[in-house]
Amino acid sequence: MKILLMGHPNVGKSVFFNRLTGAKVFESNYPGTTVDFMKGWMCIEGEDVELIDVPGTFSLEPKDKAEEVSVEMLEENRDCVVVCVLDASKIERGLYLALEIIERGYPVVVALNMWDVAEDKNIRIDVAKLERILGVPVVPTTAVSGEGFKELVSKLKASAPVKIEEVIKNAGGGESAAVSG
Amino acid sequence: MQEVVKVPQSVDERWDLIDKISRQTVEFGAYKHTLKDAIAELTVKPLTGIPVAIAVIYGFWSFFCDFAGTLFTDGFMVRLFDEHWLPWLQSVFPGGLGNPLYALMIDAGHMEDGVLVASDNCFEAFGVLTSGLFVPFGVVLWAVLAFYLIFAILEDIGYLPRLAVLVDTVLHKIGLHGYAIVPTFISLGCNVPGVTAVRPLETRKQRFMMITLLSVFVPCGAQIGIMQDLIPELMGWIFLTLVIGYLGFGFILNKIVPGKSPEIIMDVPPYQMPTFKNVMSKLWIRTSKFLLVAVPFVLLGCLIVGLMYLTGAMDWLVAVFGPLLMGWFGVPSETVAPLIAGFLRKDLAVGMIGGLMEQGIMTTFQVFTSVVLLCIYFPCLATFALMIKEENWKELLGSLASLVAMVFIYGGLIHLVGIMLGVA
Amino acid sequence: MNEMEEKFGQIYFAVLGAVALAFGIAELIASAGGGFTWGILDSSGAANPMFLSWRAIILLSVGFFYLSSVKDFAEVHQLAKAVMASIMIWIVAGMAIWSMIAGSIPGEETWFNSLEGFLASYAPPYSPEMFLLPFSLVILYYIKKEGETATE
């Protein structure tokens, strides 16, 4: 099993990566480029799992070399699970990337990182509902304090690809949160 | 909208979908950070978290000293055992000074100007019924009780996992994780449950490293309790020496032991008030487990050491190992006896060093060196038995080999530093 | 909290922070020079010299926590620093009191202490954190205020 950590730049992805991996971390260079990425290992239910910190990218339509590498890495690892790290205080932007990855048929776990910051900005996210619409596990995390990571890891094995049609159906007409409760 | 959905979607369709989703799930202005959230944040950010940790550990330590030392051991137990129990036994037990059974059970006495003198305290007497009961019930029980009480409270408040997150980055440098503080802290109570707490570690390498470091560099509550009673002024130095050893050898082990060291992810629950019932049940389970393990070994230790003195085996060992101890570690040959007793119980052995100290055989630096040596040279029998169970033979050999290497390197180093400072 | 209360809190905790800082520096000097007793202020470290420098570090941190909380005091994260500083004082002072209690119960020659001996254990001089303790309790008022605004 292999896990790719994807997300925008500046969503606390490197701290996130450090929380998940051990002391032995390798920095590698993507062949033929100047782009570096981190690689480490974690252990889920006794199984060795490789974890790759993919360079930050805004979307899967690459605009620079680093983003190109990110897309290539995703395509090279067809059998991986993608942990999509979102900034919980700006989930719209992160969801764009998450949806793109879901559309390509990868099993995804969405981490709403910087949850503390979102709380601080008076933002509340209905995690259960988001999970229901997306059809993939959604976990609030705070990388600096380690909150949520135990839950995240426990949900990695449960993730499975979902069809985007399902997501569209679940999202329905999009009545506002205030109305639906 | 009802007809076939185009996949992949266009950029606009995607944004449209996101808009729908976020309208249903995101609420602005609905949540505000509470004071509790803000405090939780302060305790994990290094700049503020480290001073808080320093204060918490200060509280931990001073509670421990006053509860176990001032109140119970010095306040009541020393009087009970030295002024009532020991004299009473000395008067009613058949035989008397010089009788082998009396020496084993009550008091072997010691030579003063060629005359055999009776002991006047339970550290020196070294009989099964005197030291054998005084060490576990007079000193160690209170130390372990105080220790596990605070530990349970910190655990239930939710501070412990946050402390683990705080030290995670530092411990990564030596190939360990924040989680390592859990077995380390438990070991400060008793190494036996400490070694058991190593089980959640994922790989053999981690378990091996952790067990080795724990059994070598972490003194147990029993030992700490006795040390605090006998040599409080040296505690700071002893702990400093052990911490340096722990980190230093952790670093080295991480380099030479093959294998991976994946992160241990801990659950970080929100802060909460600990419940009395929970804390008490944890305290009871851990303390009773400790008593079950410790008491038989202390009694056995007294018996074996007493027998070795009686049969002359101890004199032989002192003669054989004395020169090595004197030459390499700079401690007097009499230290052989506590080191042997240390195989069974470290607390008992520290008590013996205290006895030697009171007879004026050792200098302060020698006391310091021998206490540190005692700590690191071999795990007590109970811990060792558990190591046999937890490790395969290859790892066990590895543990023992690294143990021997560490003792000689570190013990010699301490001696060397002592010589350079002119105190050895 | 209203503006009045915020203003008062700012001045109050700035002063308390400065005092804590001063105590911290005094204890640092004391730990280097073997300790001192000055009137009812006990910084001798007689019980355990190791504790003296340890406490100095804590009191210095307490001082910094209080002082850094002053700006924008009503904001919850800023207030939290003052609360944390107070909790740290409670830990250290609580342990000083606990130490007195533990020392007051057993007697010198008898099992239990005499009444005079018992009471004498609580007489001054006190260590610095004991003087900070009553003043740090003011934070409780602000915690209560914060709780009220949060539930509004």
Image (cartoon, rainbow, N blue to C red):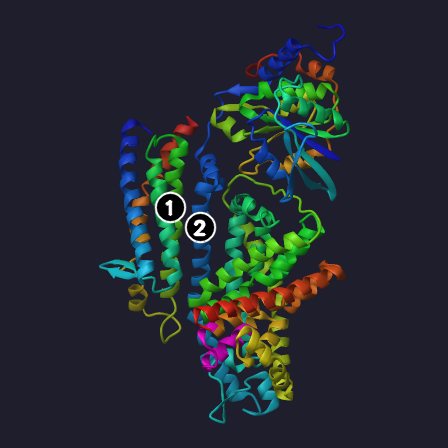
The stretch drawn in magenta includes residue C125: no
Question: As rendered, which of B6 and B151 lies closer to the eye?
Answer: B6
A127 left or right of C88 in image: right
Q: Please give the residue where the numbered disc 2 appears in the rendered image.
A: B54
Q: Please give the residue where the numbered disc 1 appears in the rendered image.
A: C61
Q: Residues within 10 Å of mark 1 (few under 14, many from 20)?
A: many
Type of amino acid under label 2: Ile
Instruction: State the separation of the CA atoms marked 2 and 1.
Output: 10 Å
The stretch drawn in magenta includes residue B354: yes
Residues rendered magenta in the picture: B349-365
Coordinates of residue B287 in the picture (x, y in percent):
58, 61
Main secondary structure found in the magenta portion: helix
Q: Is residue C79 above or below residue C105?
A: above
**CB contact under 8 Å: marks 2 and 1:** yes
Tell me the number on the disc at residue B19: none
Q: Is residue C143 above or below residue B289?
A: above
Q: Residues within 10 Å of mark 2 (few under 14, many from 20)?
A: some
- Whether residue C46 is visible, yes or no, is yes
Question: As rendered, which of A118 and B145 lies closer to the eye?
Answer: A118
Question: As rendered, which of B88 and B167 lies closer to the eye?
Answer: B167
